[in-house]
Amino acid sequence: MESWRIAFRDGLAPLLTLKGLIVLAAALETDDVRLDQGCTTVPQAGEEWFESFPVQQCCALALAILEGEGLETVTDVHGRFLEICDQASQRLGDPGAVAAFIRWHDDTPRHDMRRLLLIEVEAAIVGRRLPPGALPAA
């Protein structure tokens, strides 16, 4: 399995809220204009005069955080993004694991990124909605 999928499935998705996953799925399906590639948020974090501004566009992970946790500002979303990435790296036991997802997200053509990530997001949603042990053993 590709490293970006492992990072998302086992590291990132479990840390995102169900609401965030549902909003992300809709955004991927409809090619929401808020979805961006190549940066975490627009405006970007680190630009002091924009830190209290509301997020206008963001990467898929940041969108799930923004909508799922009810955050608004660049500072809040970026801070939580870093926390989730750190927690996911710890879950995966590899400090560089999340970077594989981020590189894939940023470097994959938009249409392909949306299509492939939507599959993973929908699987994560289904997994959250089913009671433990509901799926038959493979």
Image (cartoon, grey):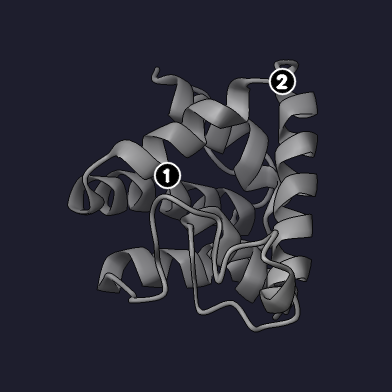
Point out residue 57 in the picture as x, y percentages from the top left corner: 47, 72
The residue at 47%/65% (across/down) is: 24
Q: CA distance from mark 2 to mark 1?
A: 22 Å
Residue in front for this viewpoint, 6 or 79: 79
- Type of amino acid at the residue the image marks with label 2: Pro
For the point 67% across and 83% down, which residue is it?
53
The residue pinned by badge 2 equals 95
Badge 1 element: helix
The amino acid at mark 1 is: Glu
Q: Is residue 19 left or right of residue 137?
A: right
Q: Earlier in the sequence, mark 2 or mark 1?
A: 2
Estimate the x, y position of residue 74 in percent, counting from the top left: 68, 71
How packed mark 2 is, by other alpha carbons closer than 10 Å (few <14, some 14-19, many 20 or more), is: some
| Mark 2 vs mark 1: in front | 2
Residue 42 in picture, x, y percent from top left: 52, 69
Q: Residue at x 72, y 20 (%)?
A: 95
Judging depth in this view, the residue of 113 and 57 nearest the camera is 57
Q: Residues within 10 Å of mark 1 (few under 14, many from 20)?
A: some
For label 2, the SS is: loop
The count of marks equals: 2
Q: Quadrant of residue 34?
A: bottom left
Label annotation for residue 120: 1
User: Does the CB distance between marks 2 and 1 fall below 8 Å?
Assistant: no
